Image: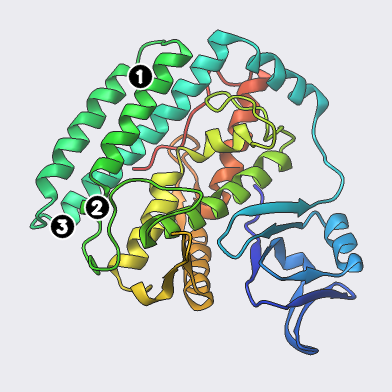
Amino acid sequence: MRQHLNTLFVTTQGAYLSREGETVLVRVEQETKLKVPIHTLGSIVCFGQVMCSPPLMGLCGERNVLISFHSERGKFLGRVQGPVSGNVLLRRAQYRCADDAAVTAAIARSVVTGKVANCRTVLLRAVRDHTDSPGASALTTAASALARQLAGLQAAQPLDIVRGLEGEAARTYFGVFDHLIVAQKESFYFCERSRRPPLDSMNALLSFLYAMLANDVTSALESVGLDPAVGFLHRDRPGRPGLALDLMEEFRPVLADRVALSLVNLQQVKGNGFTTTETGAVTMDDKTRKEVLVAWQKRKTEEVQHPFLGEKVTVGLLPYVQALLFARYLRGDLDGYPPYVWK
């Protein structure tokens, strides 16, 4: 099994990353702030005005360490990686399946089933943890609605029907999402999902974590030889990693959403760490961003029991495990794609 490696997040504006032998140096204003051995890293994630030297890029390419660049808000801008080790036979199988309407619908149904099941678990966990909360009744009702939507996904359905059920489940889940926020309600509230740009602090937090999750899932797909751009639930669109967005669906509620809710409910992030710009977009300051990244990295080091494999794996390896299972399905080693369902 692949080992979980660290991710180096660089958020300090004006930082310069360079190579010293087999070590990554992080310098700010000519002062070395950090030295990290390359063999301990799985990826480097840079936010905003962060630069990397060509020798370091070459070293990362040789050691299969992905460097990705994001805006300060977390929007993905680009990546630097070494030679792609994709299996041409696996990718051809992926393309053939994407052109088969029945297979596409079956894969989309599995992905949506995982997503809806995990959304329901998040709601039920919240009811169990906060039985006296004013929103407990609404959360229970929404969980029952998601159970009915799960039942509708048990039978084979055309892709359009699957997408319709996914949209209905998303409306049900986000319709009660505000009840999951039990602290700092004056600063963190949820009316509806807003993106590009996020229009409130909670949406800004979610968008940032979704960007981190997308980066991890894309890297996992590439590492096993799959094409992140060719999806099934999310169909082809130039510049969109369709398959990465597909596999993200089952992880959004249990990884990104729960980290965001924990940060707010435990008051690890504060409302004053977010600013509304003249355009209405909400952004987080550097201190808050670092706090979020620390929590995200800590969550990825936790161990969970994988429901399909029956083995303990770190949360950070879950996208890689699911990518492997998806590849096994495309090769014909599995009868269907088993999504990650949180227990």
Picture residue at 34% right of the left edge, 17% below the top: 154
Picture residue at 38% right of the left edge, 21% below the top: 164
Tell me how far mark 3 sits from mark 1, CA to CA: 29 Å
Tell me if label 3 and label 1 are in contact, CB under 8 Å: no
Question: x, y (%) of residue 117?
Answer: 33, 34
Indicate the amino acid at tag 3: His
Picture residue at 50% right of the left edge, 16% below the top: 106
Closer-to-camera residue (131/164): 164
Residue holding disc 1: 153
* SS state under label 3: loop
Is the residue 170 above or below the residue 281 in the image? above
Tell me how far mark 1 sits from mark 2, CA to CA: 26 Å
Question: x, y (%) of residue 90?
Answer: 74, 25
Task: Give the foreground label among 2 and 3.
Answer: 2
Question: x, y (%) of residue 44?
Answer: 70, 63
Q: Is residue 283 left or right of residue 319?
A: left
Tell me how far mark 2 sits from mark 3, CA to CA: 14 Å
**Residue 118 found in image quarter:** top left
Residue holding disc 3: 130
* SS state under label 2: helix
Is the residue 92 above or below the residue 284 in the image? above
* SS state under label 1: loop
Closer-to-camera residue (275/132): 275
Picture residue at 45% right of the left edge, 38% below the top: 250
Question: x, y (%) of residue 94?
Answer: 69, 22
* Mark 3 Cα shell of 10 Å, populated few (<14), some (14-19), many (≥20): some
Indicate the amino acid at tag 1: Leu
Indicate the amino acid at tag 2: Asp
Tell me if label 2 and label 3 are in contact, CB under 8 Å: no
Residue 178: image tag: 2
* Mark 2 Cα shell of 10 Å, populated few (<14), some (14-19), many (≥20): some
Of mark 2 and mark 3, the one earlier in the sequence is 3
